[in-house]
Amino acid sequence: MPSLTVNGQIYNIEADPLTPVLWLIRDVVGLKGTKFGCGVGVCGACTALVNGVPQSTCNIVLADIGSASITTIEGLSADSSNPLQLAWIAQQVPQCGYCQSGQIMRATQLIAGGANPTDEEIDVVMNNICVCGTYSRIRAAIHEAAGA
Amino acid sequence: MGVGLPAQGHTRRRTQTEATIYTLTAWVSVGTDDSVTILCGSQEMGQGVFSGLAQIVGEELRVDWTQVQVGPAPVGAVYDNPLLGAQMTAGSSSVRGFFTPLLYAGATARQMLVEAGAKALGVAAKDCIASNGQVVDTATGASISFGAVAEAASKLKPPAHPKLYSTKTYVLIGQSVPRPELPAKVNGTTVYGADVVVPNMVFGAVVLCPTRGGTVASVGKAPYGAQVVNLGTGVAAVVSPGPNCTTWAAIEASKQIKVKWTIPSSAAQQTSSLILAEAETLLANGTGIVAQSVGNVAGAQAGAAKVLSFTYILPYLPHATLETPNCTANVTSTACEIWAPTQAPAAAQAQAAAITGLALDAVTVNCMQMGGGLGRKLETDFVTYAVMASKALGLPVQMVFSREQDFTQDQYRPMAVCGVTIGLNAAGAIVSWDFRNVSPSILYQRGLPQGQLDDQAVEGAVDLPYAFPNLLVDWVPSPATIPVGFWRSVGNSINAFAVESAIDETALATKTDPLAYRQALLAGDARALAVLNAAATLGGWGTAQHSGYARGLAYVESFGSLAAAVVQITSVSGVIQLVNVACAADCGLVINPNTAAQQIEGGIIQGLTSALWSQMNFTKGVAQTQNFDFFRMIRMADMPPIQVTLLQTPDVAIGGLGEVGVPLMAPAVANAWAALTGKRLRKLPLFPQA
């Protein structure tokens, strides 16, 4: 039986092998922090880490995921203590908040290994849509987290 | 701080920490653990209303903000927004409508706590005050916490005439206290509409008739063993319980249902180019419904030294909230419970009652956190479909719109054609202002009788801040039948594009600086001039800039607030680049400077996206854009720096801020582009090919 590894736990999955990982995370595993936005991999709301790399999960299907390890917003820290989460609060980033799980997961790539990204690097990586327009605060929060 | 549970309708409930919660009033409950739960009559959709409204209650209550929990109010007339006369979150009205009632709500609960606290301390209530969650005897300094007297306070009769503090003593209002709902928004635990899990729930997805106005003629089966529900205007696929019960399976099944549609004959006319051509005809020849008339426009125009005439064109716009419409419903023979991200919980309740035949009080509405509202979630269509499916199947159903259904089944911002004819005297001053808006009516589609003025259509066109001696504003309803609705700032974002572009064009035609021209028009209005000049200063108006850079200005009063913006742009290989946005706004009193600034920033971004790129076009009633891959939004790399300055004016009616940033952007960008290139863009989106 296919399985899915999410936040270190292995789940046996009986669903259609063409089911996108997003919906397995949400509706089978039951972790709701990863969001549906577009279903075609362009908005970034469903961003999670696949083997440590931020990716949209609405367009990766069960049949292709293999033994990859997935980390969702729930797995980023046990107590909201990841530097990105702390900075997101300090900068009061979210408005509606719906895109912010994806934004935070996307941003992990920028500060990994103590990196200190430039604005240009942030522009390239942070391509997720925020309809509320929190981009300038996201930018400030990434800089804050990188310096933490 | 945190997000609390809705009121339970009785005076006590137990929390996980074994504290007992006592309800003092409809708005305020206090726990024996000193927690204070404040209910919010407006729904949180990102605008910070959970902090804004709770701060107003908390101010008079003199709470310790760290102990405050905020939750959505249940459906009930007591929670109606007094400004709207309904339990709705709309029109940038939350603070405006609730400010005074919530001051009294806080004062009422405070006096009950003080009375109970004084008794516990063995002193007179007149010698005690409330401070930071404590009742304090001012003579001795002895104190007792709110939680310790919550039970006693809950048994007291609320005072008939609670007394308010002087505004000079405010400790919470005006502070950027942290938003109570944010911690859950950074760790994935916020429960938005489609995050709710109801026992035995199954997933459903809708496919509505692609031709707007069409209905189901006949329907076939769905794959995946899904059940099909006929919704009249479309169908839903609902997947059976089991290992393959996912929202994805429902969406896939819904796409594969074979449906024959009945298409109304009027659909042939519902093509964007035809709708626009008809509106342009009506602009020239239609009979207008007068919205505002001052003096004698025809006479003044006949005597004018110069007459300018401009036409501005705007497209339909989808809302594109990131959370698509959704609702979870559980209908039984005796009750209906719904979980919905809704700006209109009372309307959702009424709709569910009508579908199920149940009494209103048998319908429970759980208001979920919204992943954006923007006016889309004022509608009840998504509630309807979930309730119909649950009723038909006898199961709790979570019904979700795919993004394609969201884009193509919206109630769009109306398309519009606005004509402005301006008469100038020899000195270049405006002696007549003739403004016509042609657009389909939001309110006609909701029952307003034909022939009446739809005031939504002329928002931002009437009661202008500028003093024109002769003015005529009228509206001609377009007969187009594409569903239209309330889109953040409604008529303001349509009409402000025309008004503020026309003012700019007139200034340039008279060889006057656009700031100076507006200053002259606003002469004598100190508050307006302060806002205009603050934005000009913040945006560096008139100061040196790089070659190839230009600035554009707009000034708009909406929702009781005054706002102005300076947008600076440049062009790289003919493509616009946003360099900077500076905005000043005056809403009277600012409750929370941080959330106020956030709302203006957010309005600016939405205004920029829609001005630069957004449109929805129709071919024979079918929406032509289905998803974000063909609908460009501002993203990080497009994002200009934004500066916001908030002016405050004491002792004036409070204005709203949730929408005021939006209308400024289209004219400010168009004005900047004209300054940069000499080319005037009068049609939105400004850069449709981008």
Image (cartoon, rainbow, N blue to C red):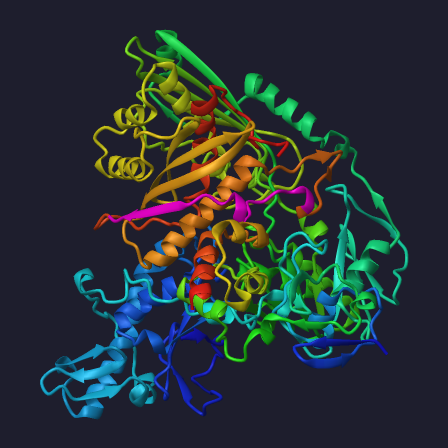
Q: Is residue B600 left or right of residue B266?
A: left
Please tell me which residue is depicted at 42% across the width and 61% down the height of the picture.
B49
x, y percentage for residue B249? Answer: 80, 64
The residue closer to the viewer here, B454 or B194, is B194
> Picture quarter containing residue A53?
bottom right
Q: Is residue B45 visible?
A: yes
Give the quadrant of the N terminus of chain B: bottom left
Q: Is residue B290 visible?
A: no
> Picture quarter containing residue B152?
bottom left
Tally of numbered discs: 0
Position of B150 relative to B555 (above/below): below
Magenta span covers which residues? B629-648
Position of A101 relative to B534 (above/below): below
Q: Is residue B256 left or right of residue A10?
A: right
Q: Is residue B640 magenta?
A: yes
Q: Is residue B245 magenta?
A: no
Position of B480 relative to B132 (above/below): above
**Furthest-left residue in view?**
B139
> Picture quarter containing residue B483?
top right
Position of B322 relative to B33 (above/below): above
x, y percentage for residue B50? Answer: 42, 65
Q: Is residue B43 left or right of residue B209?
A: left
Give the quadrant of the C terminus of chain B: top right
x, y percentage for residue B104? Answer: 29, 67
x, y percentage for residue B221? Answer: 90, 59
